[in-house]
Every structure is written in structure tokens, then in C-alpha cells.
Image (cartoon, helix red, strand yellow):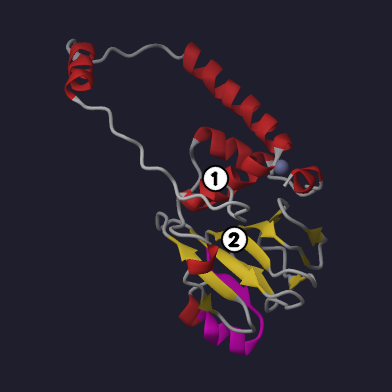
Amino acid sequence: MMNDMKQIKHHLTEPLLIGYAAGTLPEAFNLVVATHISMCDTCRAALAEYEAVGGEVMLDADPVDVAEDALAATLAMIDGGHLAERPKPIRTQNSVFPGPLQDYISGDFDSLKWRKVGGGVSQLVLNTSKDASVRLLRIPAGTAVPDHGHQGTELTLVLQGAFTDEEDRFGAGDVEVANEDLHHTPVAEEGVDCICLAATDAPLLFNGIVPRIAQKFIGI
Ligand SMILES: [Zn+2]
């Protein structure tokens, strides 16, 4: 993992970091941003600066009075509650899934319910709010994902292995931010299967007729 961190070349964009700091991104995008930040010192430092800006804005804001008994009522609720024991997350050693992602995945890698989506590619859709979707993609080593375009924004974070498309090579920790202008055919590198976390806020546009039909069923 240390080696992977040093090799990260493709980072989050400024609007994504600002959106994450401001809390305005869909949950699906938040998950990709949080997962990249857990792998990337550069973006974690950049995020801290945007969050500091938010802190300054809050300090400068004019206070608004709350109900007179708000403090007493809150303290009473704290006194009346009991300390909940936080359930221990199931963490497997050498997991390809960083911390933020593990909250969305139950069980370890071998027990995941992958669904085949054609061409050897499998996916696992994660449960988030409806305004965007996020899934794990497993692309067998040496395999191509069908050529496709994008209606909205697609974020693809590599967790294991690497893929190459018309833009560049993306290795573990790298994130590709694709939009309407990008039509690409990602190909997984030889070696290990490429596992990605991919979020979209609109359906992808596949160029071939077969993928377009398949899209109806897989819901990418
Ligand atoms: Zn980064």
C-alpha cells in the first residue's frame, strides 16, 4: 500500500474536493472521494484546507438564537442515553477495500455477490441514496470494458490492478474523472484482475448495440 500511495498520479478535481468539504455531493460521489482520500496524502491535505475555509465561514457567521431550553434539553438527552458500543467493523487483512468502503460491504472479499454484466466483467452495486449510483467493478486481467460515453460525471477509482484507456494509465489509488466529452474503452492490465469503485450521476452511453441492450438489464 505504501508503494501504491507514492504512485498516485490522477487526483480528485478541485470541484469534487470543494463539494465534499461543503457536503453537497451525492452519497455515491462522497464514497469515492472518501475512499481516494484514505489512499492519497495529497488530496487529504488539499481537503483539509477547504474544510478550514468552511470553519472560518462558520466562525464569521452571525449566530442565530435557539430555543431557550435547547441546552438543558440536549444535556438531559445525553444524561438519559447509554453509551452505545460501536459494532466492530469486519476487516480482513490485506483487504483491497479501504476503510470508508468497508462500511458498505459486508463480509470479506471471497463472499461478495458479484453479478456478471457481460464480457467477463462483474459488478456489485452498493446501497446509497438515489441521486447517483456507485458500484464495484471487477474487470479480469487483460479484458476491455465496452466503449462508452457519459451523460453526466463518472468517477472511477482503482482499488487493485490497473486499467488503460485513451487518456492514460490508471493504477491503484488513481481516480479518473470522466464527463460528456470522454468516450473511452478501459482495458484492464495483464496480471491481476482490476477492481474499481465507479460512481455515476447519469446512465452511461454505450456505443455498440449489444451493450446498449445489456445496459437495460444491468442498469449502469
Ligand atoms: Zn489524490
Above-or-below relation of 88 to 93 = above
Name the secondary structure under disc 1: helix
**80 over 72 or under it: above or below:** below
Mark nearer the viewer, 2 or 1 = 1
User: To which residue does mark 1 refer?
Assistant: 99
Residue 178 point in image, percent of width and height: 68, 59
Q: Which quadrant would residue 160 be assigned to in this image?
A: bottom right
- Magenta stretch bounds: 202-215
The image shows residue 38 at horizontal and vertical percentages of 62, 41
Q: Amino acid at mark 1?
A: Gly
**For mark 2, what is the residue?**
198
Label 2, label 1: how far apart the Cα atoms are: 16 Å
Q: Earlier in the sequence, mark 2 or mark 1?
A: 1
Mark 2: amino acid: Ala
Tag 2, which secondary structure?
strand
Q: Quadrant of residue 78?
A: top left
Which residue occupies the extreme bottom position in the image? 210
- The answer to whether one can see residue 178 in this image is no
**Is residue 204 found inside the magenta-colored segment of the image?**
yes
Image location (x, y in percent) of residue 59: 49, 12
Horizontal and vertical percent position of residue 157:
66, 55
